[in-house]
Image: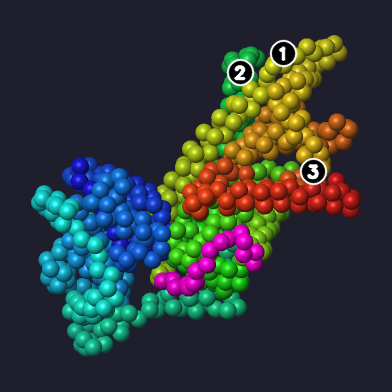
Amino acid sequence: MNVISLVGPPNAGKTTLFNYLSGQNLKTVNYPGATVEYNSAKLQKKFGIDAQLIDTPGIVSLIPASLDEVVTVQGIYNNPEYGVPELIIVTVDSSQLSRHLLLVEELLESKFRIVVALTMIDILERKGFTVDCEKLSEKLGGVPVVKVDPRSGKGVDKLLDYAKKLLAEPFDADQIVPVNEDSKHLIELYKGIEKIEKDVILSKDKTVKTSSIRNSLHAPDELTLKIDKFLLSKGVGFFVFILIMVVMFASIFWLAAPLMNLVDQFFGLLASWTVELLGKSFITDFIADGVIAGLGAVSVFVPQIIILFLILGLLEDSGYLARGAMLIDRPLARIGLNGRSFVPLMSGFACAIPAIMSTRTIPNRRERLLTIFIIPLISCSARLPVYALLIAFLVPAGHALLSGAILAAIYISSITITIIAAGVINKVRGIIKAEDKSSFILELPTYKMPKLSVVWKNTWTSTKTYVRSAGLIILTFSIILWVLTFFPNYNPKIDAANLTPAQVEAQTQVARINGSYAAELGKIIEPAMVPLGLDWRVGVAVLTTFAAREVFVSSLALMFKITESKDDYSIQRSILKSMKNAVAEDGKPLFTTSTVIGLIIFFIIALQCISTMAISRKETGSWRIPLLQFAIYSGGAYILAVIAVNLLRAVGVS
């Protein structure tokens, strides 16, 4: 099988072309260095070429300046899985030839076999210019040059015709030579590229003088300038940025509420139908309470996760994300970071794992390690189900606006705590042991109207990935927890005299849980829960979150689902009802305003994800930073939660 690598500068359409050729739906972020690992897929059969495609992080030169560029360069010269590619398709922004042709020249000098895919033709034509592909091919020594539109597929067939012809010829990987890193040689290359651009870029207006073409060609996009004049202004820019963030988090509740109700009722009915169909038995309890209730308790929050990914996708596809990095650069500089940390931190709202991996785009080692250190403080989508449940306990049903405001306040608090932590860690030099010179240079892409089909596909793919990865963990731990709560006292003796069937069922479940393995485990950690005003049952639920935070909801569903009525088909409503009816050993309510606020504070700060610690260890090269993260964040979260609960109780909030 042939191997084809796609290489190109950031924002040149490389990953979009990869998606079109492979049929995959990889995320295309409008920001340099968004891809930090190479992705591979087979070329679709309809194109008639048996080839493996490799998508790589964006680079402008074969001389790497950051870790993600190292991934690309190493993957080109000798991919660890596929070796040297038989063909490289280079995406080049036709409106940026003077900068993007450097990569083409370096690949040719290194003896790679390439085809040039000219993208962004519409932007070039909007400026009143066109490019002579035949002449450009001639200037590059006969390399095939094809105009393509990766979004629509225009020109792709011609591109693959050239690829097919080249792949039919023998290729010797031993002919590849290292890139010439001599600075004088680079200067000569740039001079030659300027001449090439001058010869191949033609004005549609024949009256335009050749001498003025270059100035017109590199003039900024007028529409982008007008929008940036407003969105990047000193006063308005930051206000709009904050407004967009608040609207995003408020929408998570407001827009998702109807869909959440439907999902919730579906799983509730499914559990009820299972009981009616199979009758009351050991297997029925396992399916209804162990599997369906566990998955349903988390699936109800999938609409909120979809909305989060969708809004982030719209911001990325429009080009606003890079502006956010620019706006936030100055505030970040005060805590030892720069604008390059913005995208990893924003990615943290979805998941900490890819966010930590995306820090490879930060060339400064100290800033990279500091960014990795604070990313777990960003409230990821795994916390969203927990926040949603706890907010639903605090806020009466039907008050979506208030719920959204509280969720926005939680996320703002998360960001504030992250900023404070970064400032403190930056000052305490012993935590991050690295020094490097810092700089921040960012290419701002032109504004584009988001392509809704692409954004939706990316959103759906991200959501499916989340559900698949989280779903298996949740299902596994739901089953484990069901076993722990069901045995060994699975059939306790209850005095049924003068009790209704519903009361017998409730007392049976109470007796079963109190005599279970989960109770034995929970009572070991109960002393740590007492200062929070909680008991061993919540302790067990919190303990399970260190595998995945989302498990907290399904754990509560199993630990407290003891007052569900036969007519209540809503799993979430059942959990909330059980939480409100739950009492401590002294007979007082277990879940109160103060204890729930304490839990929210704990979940905002605590590091409860083993996978995050593992990726942190991988990216930093040792266990030192992940262990410090765990000790500082989880320990600090516990102390602050205890203080908050007891202060609230002291002022009468119970």
Q: Nearer the viewer, residue 223 or 145?
A: 145
Q: Which mark is residue 317?
A: none
Q: Nearer the viewer, residue 464 or 626?
A: 626
Q: Indicate whether residue 443 is drawn in magenta.
A: yes
Disc number lying in front (2 or 1): 1
Q: Residue at x 58, y 22 (%)?
A: 287
Q: Amino acid at mark 1?
A: Asn
Q: Which residue is mark 3?
A: 532
Q: Dot 2 corresponds to which residue?
A: 284
The range drawn in magenta is 427-444
Q: Is residue 70 left or right of residue 564?
A: left
Q: CA distance from mark 1 to mark 3?
A: 32 Å
Can residue 473 be seen here?
yes
Q: Quadrant of residue 419?
A: bottom right
Tell me the chief SS of the magenta region: loop
Q: Residue under circle 1?
A: 491
The crowding category of the residue bearing disc 2, from other C-alpha atoms within 10 Å (few below 14, some 14 to 19, many at least 20), is some
